[in-house]
C-alpha cells in the first residue's frame, strides 16, 4: 500500500501544486488585459497545456523513482524546479513583478535544462518526457519578456 501511495504522489504532485497555485492566483490573472507579443496564445490554452505538462512531469519522475529510490541531487533539483515553477505564477500574476518574473523564468529554464541533462544520465524516458515542458517554458520566457516590454 505504501508503494502505491508513493507512486500516486510521484505521479500527481506536480498537478496538485499547479492546482494550488491556480487557486491562489485565479483572481489576479490579468493576461487578457495585457498587450501581448506576437504568437501569444489564447488564455484558454494555458490550463490545458499546464495540465498535460504537470502530468508528464509526474510520469517522468515516477519512472525515475521506480529505478532510483534513494534520494539524491536529482530529487532535490526536481522539487526545487517545481517550487520555482509555482512561484513564477505568483510573481507574475499576484505580485505583478514582471521584471522579476523574467529573471525567475530564466532561472526555471536553467533548472529544467539541468534536470533533463541529469535524467538523460540515468533514465532517458524521464528526460524525454520533460522536453515539452522545457519547450513550453522557453515559450513562456518569450511571452514574459514580450509582455514586460509591451506593458
Image (cartoon, helix red, strand yellow):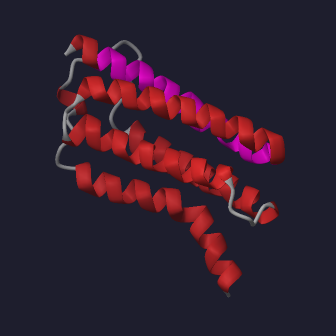
Q: Is residue 146 magenta?
A: yes
Q: Image check: 2 left or right of 97?
A: right
Q: Residue at x 48, y 58 (%)?
A: 15
Q: Position of residue 129 (x, y in %)?
A: 69, 43
Q: Position of residue 56 (x, y in %)?
A: 62, 50
- Figure quadrant of residue 124: top right
Number of marks drawn? 0
Q: Residue at x 59, y 53 (%)?
A: 76
State the quadrant of the C terminus.
top left
Q: Image check: 64 left or right of 26?
A: right
Q: Image check: 14 left or right of 87?
A: right
Q: Image check: 104 left or right of 98?
A: right
Camera-nearest residue between 79 and 60: 79
Point out the stretch of residues depicted in magenta: 123-147
Identify whether 136 is placed above or below 51.
above
- Figure quadrant of residue 72: bottom right
State the quadrant of the N terminus.
bottom right
The outermost residue toward the bottom is 1
Identify whether 78 is placed above or below 140.
below
Camera-nearest residue between 111 and 38: 111
Q: Residue at x 27, y 38 (%)?
A: 91
Q: Is residue 36 visible?
A: no
- Figure quadrant of residue 69: bottom right
Identify whether 151 is placed above or below 73.
above
The outermost residue toward the front is 72
Q: Is residue 22 magenta?
A: no
Q: Position of residue 62 (x, y in %)?
A: 69, 61
* Helix, strand or loop for the magenta stretch, by majority: helix
Q: Residue at x 74, y 56 (%)?
A: 64
Q: Is residue 87 visible?
A: yes
Q: Position of residue 79 (x, y in %)?
A: 53, 53
Amino acid at each position: 500500500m505504501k508503494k502505491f501511495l508513493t507512486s500516486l504522489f510521484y505521479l500527481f504532485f506536480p498537478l496538485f501544486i499547479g492546482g494550488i497555485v491556480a487557486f491562489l492566483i485565479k483572481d489576479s490573472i490579468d493576461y487578457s488585459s495585457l498587450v501581448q507579443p506576437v504568437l501569444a496564445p489564447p488564455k484558454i490554452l494555458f490550463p490545458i497545456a499546464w495540465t498535460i505538462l504537470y502530468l508528464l512531469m509526474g510520469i517522468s519522475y515516477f519512472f525515475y523513482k521506480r529505478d532510483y529510490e534513494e534520494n539524491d541531487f536529482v530529487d532535490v533539483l526536481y522539487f526545487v524546479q517545481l517550487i520555482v515553477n509555482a512561484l513564477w505564477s505568483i510573481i507574475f500574476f499576484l505580485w505583478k513583478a514582471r521584471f522579476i518574473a523574467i529573471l525567475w523564468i530564466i532561472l526555471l529554464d536553467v533548472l529544467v535544462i539541468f534536470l533533463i541533462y541529469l535524467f538523460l544520465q540515468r533514465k532517458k524516458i524521464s528526460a524525454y518526457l520533460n522536453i515539452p515542458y522545457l519547450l513550453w517554458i522557453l515559450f513562456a520566457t518569450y511571452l514574459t519578456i514580450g509582455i514586460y516590454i509591451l506593458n
